[in-house]
Structures are given as C-alpha cells and as structure tokens.
Amino acid sequence: MRPVAGWIVLLAAAVGSILLAAPPAPKPEADPPEGFSAGRAMLHVERIAVRPHPWGTAANRLVRDYVRAGLERHGFEVRVERSHAGLPAPVENVVALKRGTDSTGLVVLCAHYDSVAAGPGAGDDGAAVGALLETARALSEAPSLRNDLLLLVTDGEEAGLLGAKAFTRADPLADAVSVVLNFEARGISGRSLMFETSPGNRDLVAHYAAVMGRPAACSLMTAFYRIMPRTTDFAIFRKADYAGLNFAFIGGAVHYHAPTDTPANLSPASVQHHGNAMLGLARRLGNADLRTLEHDEDATYFDVLGLAFVQYPLWLDWPLTGLCVLAILLVLWRARRRGTLDGRGFGYGAWTGVRILASCAIVAGAMGYVLLQGLAAHVSRGAEATTSDPWFFAAFACLFLAAATGWTAWAARRGHGHGVIAGVLALWGLVLVAATAFLPGASFLFLWPLVFALPAIDAALGARVPSWAAAPFLPLVVLGAPLGLLLLQGMGLTLAMVHAPIFGLFLGLPAAVLDRDGAGDARLLVGLPLLLAAAGVAVGVLQL
C-alpha cells in the first residue's frame, strides 16, 4: 500500500496548494480611506457594467463621462483625448494627470472602459476601471507623490487596441512615459496575475515583489504568453518600447465576453488583488527615482502559493541548469556503480517515460474533443467552461495520473522499475535544458522541484525505496499544481496537447519512485484516478 499512501499525501498537498493560492479577502467599504477597498471599487463597477457598452455607442459615452467625473473629483487634470484616424467613430481616451512634487518621470496606470457587445464587461475591464477610480481616491487621501502619475483609461480596446494605439501615436504625454502598468481580465475570478513584462524586467519585478503581500507572478507565464494568440493594450505599449507590467485574472472564463460578465458574478477578492497591485505600485514607483530604473537585465521569478517570492537574475539559469544536469548524471552513475541500472533497463525506462508523456498528450486531446463536442449542445462557451472550472482541471490531472501510474506499474512488474526512474529522470533533464534554451525564465519549474526530489530518486535507485520517498516530491506538487491550473485556464483546450506532457513529466517521476518494485495494487493506482476523473467531469458539468 506504500504507493497509494504516498499518492494520498501528494494529492492532498495538491488540493491544499490550489486552495491556498487564492486572492486576498476583499476589504469592505468602511475600510480606512488611505487603503484600497474592493467594496468601494465594486460600487464603481456596478455603475460601469450596467449594460454592454462597446466602442462608439451612447452607452460607452455614458461610461466615459462617469470615469471622467470620478477622476476630476480626486484632483486630477482630466481631458478626453479624441482621435478619428479614419475610423467610423472617434476613439475617446480619458487621460488624467496628477503632477508630482519633484518628478523624475511619468508612471502610467492603464485600463480600458469599453466592453464587447455581448456583455456588460464587469470583469473585462470594469473591474480594472473601478480599481483605478478607487486608487485615485486613495491617493487623494495621502501626500502627493514625487513623480507625475497618469491614469489612462483607453477606449476601443475590444475593437483592436485603438485607444492604446492613439495614445502612443499622438498624445502629448506619450514620449514622457517611464513605466506603464496595464490591468486586464479574462474572466471574473482568481488571483490578479502579473503575467507579462517588458524586456529587462529585473528592477520592475523587484518593485512588484516589494509591495505585494500576496504576489502572483512567475516568469513562466511571460514565456508562455508570448506564444499565445491573445493580446491586450500592453502589446502596443511594449511595441512602443515602454517599460511595464501587465496584470489580469483569468478564473471563470466562461463569463468572459459573455452576458454573464456582470457585477453580481465578479469576485470582489479579484478586484481587491488588482487594487493591491495598482495602489501599491503607484505609491512605490510614484516615489522612486525613475532615472535609476534599470532595463538591461531580465529576472527569473516565481511565487510560492502567494506566500513567498523568489527572484534571481536570468543569467543564472544556465549555471543552475548545468549543476542540476551534473547532479542527474551523478545519480545515474551511482546507480550504475551499485549494479541497479544497466543500459537495457535505462533504454526501456526512457521509452516508458516517452509513452507516459505521449499518453498524456493523447488523453488531453481526446478528452478536450469529447468535452467540447458534448458541451456544445448545452453551453455555447464550452471551451471556456471546461478550462475555467477547477473540477475539469482535477479530471484532467487524474487522467494524467492514471496514465503515469499505469505505465510505471506495467514496467515495474517486468523488472524495470529502476530503469523507469532513470529514464524519466533523464527525460526531465532534457526538458530542463530545452526550457533553459528556448523558454527563458521557465526553467525554474523543472529545476527546483528536481533539486528537492533528487535525494528520494537517488535512494530509490539503490536497494530499496525509503518510507519517506513521497516527502521530497511535495515541493513539486506545491509549485506545480497551481501552475498546472493556470496553464489550463490560460492556454485552453486548444493547446492542451502542448502542455499535457509537462503534467506527464511531473507525475511520472514520483510514480516511478513510489511504485519502483511494482508492489502497489495496479487496479487501485489506475482505477481510482479514473473514477475521480469521471467524478470531476460530472461535478463540473452539473455546475455549468
């Protein structure tokens, strides 16, 4: 029963990690005025997201006027910057400036106020506009900032990033921008993720880490976002060579661009997390010497359940990867010297590892197809429904677990348990090198979990599997489970086959170690995850 007990520990840690990686509790309207209150920001969202207000409509002009009046009340110099540029309707950005006491540059906070025609846009992007208005109010309760601060509320984002384009091309303040912070949403819940940065992000990431009590960021997201077919106003700012950070929450994507993107469905906790970053960075960067802000070095960074933040220079990725590869080779050499590993066993194990990864990709593609086809008749937004619900993620994860435990148990019963450990370990090393080479900033996901797991791997390649073998894999689960959910939410079912092998790698290594001798009940190790996967799909469908 040792493998089953080990998996119970790891699965409990996975569930706990996802629950802990949550946004902070929202603060009520009665919270002290100098702080950010989601309760107060939600009052604005309720006024902004009354009805759909796409670019060029009378409803959108009402939102424009509401935003303008709110910013004027808090002491900003406000103007509406209109740009036609051959368009059927003008783009009308609300531009609000507050002069600093001894400015070293211009800090820009940005959100867009238009919605799509299909929904009122409480999450996208009413939450950010409401947070901007609450941030403006909180700043008015404190002494003026050192630097100039610009609140840029763009128009026409949903129609093709029109407001951001108009600002960078023609606004008088465009050339004065030192740093821009953009706030978006692709859903109605979840943590406010700092998911994209400009090049040379080390200093900006350090400022972010300094102000966030519940950080939610990792350099893996920036690496993956660059290959995804999605964009925000930040793409225009990045193209204009502005330094900056991009934020969004992505939970509950079934409500994205839908009639149900309403204030009633919007999570106040997500608004609070947006506001914590917005107000915290406005004050931090608003009082910094922006002339000393460096943009010549990138960082590798990640948060651990929002409780801790790790950051180091990106150039350290290769030395750390090299040391980790040497450690892998040392573990394999020790197994060879002890006589528990030979060439045939290693080759068989590596092939088993490939089958685990391929099986996860096939399972992801098949399950995604079945879900989309099955839900199409009942839910018009089936793709978003399946990627936004943690129950569907649990179903995917359990299917991947069944594939990993099934293949490792099958190989272990044929006397190749040591070889499977060694083969999957070698594949892990190859993926680590590939991530370091081709996805800068993503290598931490494969580096640090392996560092903690190597003692258990080395012991399992010896005479017996120690009773504590599951414990060194806890960092893998704590780091991997929340990121796995974000990958599914962010990349969606259409790219599930791409990131599914990562799950296979993460599950294959502990599966090989825990059931090295084939001592576990294969029916339980495979059958129980399959039952849990079916239960996850059932609960997810019932909640739609």
Image (tube, rainbow, N blue to C red):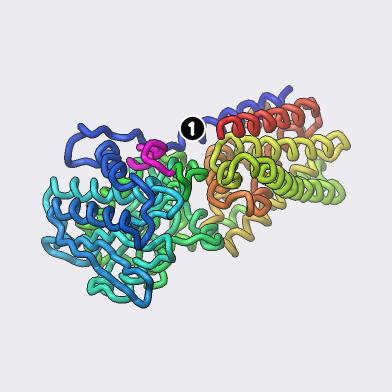
Which x, y percent locates residue 540?
60, 33
- Residue located at (35% from left, 67% from top): 164
The three-letter code of the residue at mark 1 reads Leu
Rendered image quadrant of residue 90? bottom left
Which x, y percent locates residue 349?
80, 46
From this view, report whether residue 540 is shown above or below residue 41.
Answer: above
Which x, y percent locates residue 385?
56, 42
What residue is pinned by disc 1?
A: 19
From this view, report whether residue 428 is shown above or below residue 83.
Answer: above
Does residue 161 appear in the picture of this structure?
yes
In the rendered structure, the answer to whether residue 243 lies left or right of residue 35 reads right
Q: Quadrant of the C terminus?
A: top right
- Residue located at (76% from left, 25% from top): 524
Which x, y percent locates residue 449?
58, 44
Number of callouts in the render? 1
Looking at the rendered structure, the secondary structure element under dot 1 is helix
Q: Which residues are magenta?
A: 261-272
Q: Quadrant of the N terminus?
A: top right
- Residue located at (43% from left, 63% from top): 159
- Residue located at (31% from left, 57% from top): 58
Does residue 472 appear in the picture of this structure?
no
In the rendered structure, the answer to whether residue 96 lies left or right of residue 458 reads left
Q: Nearer the viewer, residue 33 or 343?
A: 33
Q: Furthest-top residue in view?
A: 1
Any magenta on residue 165?
Answer: no
